[in-house]
């Protein structure tokens, strides 16, 4: 069914985005700053994923349970928040950016919680 494929693709892309955010945050904490190019690249990827969520929202709304739809909506909120966070922090130097690590951590925690929930809801029942 097409809705299952869309759901699977969105979940897979969300997990990849979460891993990318975790790697970015780890580097950000180690260095204290990131290059503008790295931040823009990740931000653009997050916004693209948000666009894909919105494009498929009607299908998800029709085919998913309310708990799954709520988890997808929370993923969208976390991705959007992280992308906006990556837009800030370029104050003194045009080449480097300092983003709010706490906001990124909150987004990652939300993404972890929601992706675990979505993964658990689709596991086949054991006999």
Image: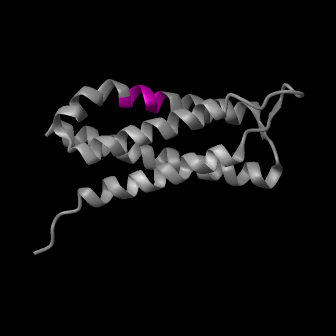
Q: Is residue 36 in sight in this rendering?
A: yes
Tell which residue pokes out farthest to the right in this image: 92
Q: Is residue 123 above or below residue 55?
A: below
Residue at the (61%, 30%) spot, across then down = 84
How would you classify the magenta stretch by its main secondary structure?
A: helix
Quadrant into which the N terminus falls? top left
Q: Is residue 20 in sight in this rendering?
A: no
Residue at the (37%, 31%) spot, across then down = 53
- Image position of 36 (left or right of 92): left
Q: Is residue 13 above or below residue 86?
A: below
Residue at the (15%, 67%) spot, across then down = 125
> Residue 62: where, in percent of width, then height?
17, 33
Q: Total marks drawn?
A: 0
> Residue 64: where, in percent of width, then height?
20, 41
Residue at the (38%, 58%) spot, across then down = 116
> Residue 96: where, in percent of width, then height?
82, 34
Tell which residue pokes out farthest to the bottom in this image: 127
Point out the stretch of residues depicted in magenta.
48-53
Quadrant into which the C terminus falls? bottom left
- Magenta segment: does it hold 49? yes
- Magenta segment: does it hold 29? no
> Residue 93: where, in percent of width, then height?
88, 28
Q: Quadrant of residue 43?
A: top right
Q: Quadrant of residue 42?
A: top right
Q: Quadrant of residue 26?
A: bottom right
- Image position of 17 (left or right of 83): left
């Amino acid at each position: 069914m097409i809705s299952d494929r869309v759901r699977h693709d969105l979940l897979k892309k969300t997990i990849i985005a979460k891993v990318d955010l975790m790697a970015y945050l780890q580097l950000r904490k180690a260095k204290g700053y990131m290059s503008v190019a790295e931040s823009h690249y990740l931000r653009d990827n997050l916004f693209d994923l948000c666009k894909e969520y919105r494009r498929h929202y009607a299908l998800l709304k029709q085919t998913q349970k309310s708990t799954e739809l709520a988890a997808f909506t929370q993923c969208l909120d976390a991705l959007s928040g992280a992308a906006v966070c990556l837009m800030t922090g370029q104050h003194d130097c045009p080449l480097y950016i300092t983003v709010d690590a706490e906001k990124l951590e909150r987004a990652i925690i939300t993404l972890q919680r929601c992706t675990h929930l979505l993964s658990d809801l689709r596991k086949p029942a054991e006999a």
